[in-house]
């Protein structure tokens, strides 16, 4: 369609030819990595505006980086949430538990016990710290790398593992891809594999909460690659037009599967800057600084509860490992990126902070890590009694017709009966999960 009609004289032939820009990551496998060009700013230097301020007053916060923890492992500046040591230890414990859980589940997938898993190594603070800044009944609409929210909210590990194994203990009855959890009791909306759909859902839920005069707000998480989806932009429009009490969390971990963040617009500006065009409050935060993550989420939550408006938060972090167990990052990025990332590891940074203020030590850290690993191991062994991939311990075949309609239509009732009859013919002696 871009070709000129046949025989048409080429107009403006003396004009320079147009050129298309195709984003290209700076480093590919084998390249030497140098992140010295990243402007990560100095901890404690970013101003903390009033939570009810007009978005136009905080433009610089969409381009800088809110940081609290310094190179001295101490907290600095107005964004320091001044959390007590016990809360900090709980946060560290939750993050360590997430990491132990990831390690065990990744290994389980490699052993053939489940078909799929996604780790969040290096991004634990963006879910754990953020979740701890919200009320326990605030509704969350996560993406697929926010297992830390469920763990921070006390969701039983065995229920998570049952879902990953799609076994007979899976409350979702094997109808979701592994790691796509759902828990009404923990205000955790069902994860969808269709990326960015959770953003308009979160805004719609927040609007409904406001219409009913409720006090609960909504928060959603989406990767930076998914901000290129139309759903994300629709969500931003509705959020600002109706002043929805919602927080839009964008996890900028530099990579969307095998495509780097430039394909979503990172070469041109920050993802937090997208807030400015919509009239949203925008914050760009060090996603590997647990204190900064907590402070930003708390600021946005207070703003939403005060009917001061929605907030878009970009958490600047790094995906330390593959996109999923189906991905090999060595095929598209330099192996040095993880070690050269200038913002470090969120778990280690929080640990060093607690040690620096005299509230922790290496011995207790080692003990905590061991206890977390043993707790996950025990939950895994218990869940495996309900079955693993390929071992036949799953929900009864007949349940495939349940839980979709309030009253099953006649044609599905007929199909259900037919399927059960055929199964009885095939297995005349019966099976435990028939």
Image: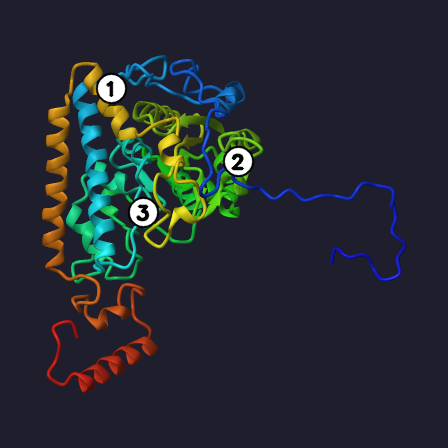
- The reply to whether residue 235 is in sight is no
Q: Nearer the viewer, residue 371 or 111?
A: 111
Q: Position of residue 369 (x, y in %)?
A: 15, 34
The alpha-carbon separation of the residues under discs 3 and 2 comes to 29 Å
> Residue shown at 43%/14% (left/top)?
47
Which comes sooner in the sequence, label 1 or label 2?
2
Q: Position of residue 259 (x, y in %)?
A: 48, 46
Which label sits on residue 353?
1
Disc 3 marks which residue?
189
Q: Nearer the viewer, residue 261 or 84?
A: 261
Say few, some or many: other residues with alpha carbon within 10 Å of mark 3 (under 14 / 14 to 19 / 20 or more): many
Q: Position of residue 426 (x, y in %)?
A: 20, 85
- The reply to whether residue 279 is in sight is yes
The alpha-carbon separation of the residues under discs 3 and 1 comes to 33 Å
> Residue shown at 20%/41% (left/top)?
100
Disc 2 marks which residue?
266
Q: Quadrant of the C terminus?
A: bottom left
Observer-side mark, 3 or 1, equals 1
């Amino acid at each position: 369609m871009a070709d000129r009609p046949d025989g048409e004289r080429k107009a403006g032939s003396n004009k320079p030819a147009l050129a298309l820009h195709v984003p290209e990551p700076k480093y590919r496998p084998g390249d030497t990595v140098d992140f010295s060009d990243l402007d990560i700013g100095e901890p404690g230097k970013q101003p903390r505006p009033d939570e009810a301020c007009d978005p136009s007053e905080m433009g610089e916060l969409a381009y800088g980086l809110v940081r609290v923890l310094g190179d001295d492992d101490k907290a600095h500046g107005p964004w320091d949430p001044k959390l007590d040591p016990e809360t900090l230890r709980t946060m560290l414990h939750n993050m360590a538990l997430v990491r132990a859980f990831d390690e065990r589940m990744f290994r389980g997938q490699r052993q053939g016990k489940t078909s799929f898993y996604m780790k969040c190594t290096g991004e634990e603070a963006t879910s754990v710290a953020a979740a701890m800044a919200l009320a326990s009944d605030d509704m969350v609409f996560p993406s697929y790398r926010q297992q830390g929210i469920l763990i921070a909210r006390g969701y039983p590990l065995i229920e998570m593992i049952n879902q990953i194994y799609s076994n007979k203990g899976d409350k979702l009855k094997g109808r979701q891809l592994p790691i796509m959890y759902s828990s009404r009791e923990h205000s955790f909306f069902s994860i969808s594999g269709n990326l960015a759909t959770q953003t308009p859902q979160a805004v719609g839920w927040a609007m409904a909460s406001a219409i009913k005069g409720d006090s609960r707000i909504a928060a959603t998480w989406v990767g930076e690659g998914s901000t290129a989806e139309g759903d994300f932009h629709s969500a931003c429009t509705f959020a600002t037009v109706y002043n929805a009490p919602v927080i839009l969390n964008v996890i900028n971990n530099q990579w969307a599967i095998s495509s780097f963040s430039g394909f979503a617009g990172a070469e041109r500006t920050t993802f937090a800057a997208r807030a400015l065009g919509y009239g949203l409050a925008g914050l760009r935060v060090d996603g590997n600084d647990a204190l900064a993550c907590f402070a930003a989420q708390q600021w946005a939550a207070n703003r939403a509860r005060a009917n001061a408006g929605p907030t878009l938060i970009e958490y600047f972090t790094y995906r330390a490992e593959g996109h999923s167990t189906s991905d090999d990052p060595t095929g598209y990025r330099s192996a040095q990126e993880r070690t050269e990332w200038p913002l470090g590891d969120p778990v280690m940074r929080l640990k060093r902070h607690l040690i620096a203020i005299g509230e922790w030590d290496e011995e207790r850290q080692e003990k905590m890590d061991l206890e977390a690993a043993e707790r996950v191991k025990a939950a895994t062994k218990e869940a495996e009694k309900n079955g693993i991939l390929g071992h036949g311990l799953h929900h009864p075949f007949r349940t495939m017709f349940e839980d979709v309609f309030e009253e099953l239509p006649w044609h599905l009732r007929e199909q259900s009966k037919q399927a059960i009859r055929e199964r009885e013919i095939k297995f005349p002696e019966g099976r435990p999960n028939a």
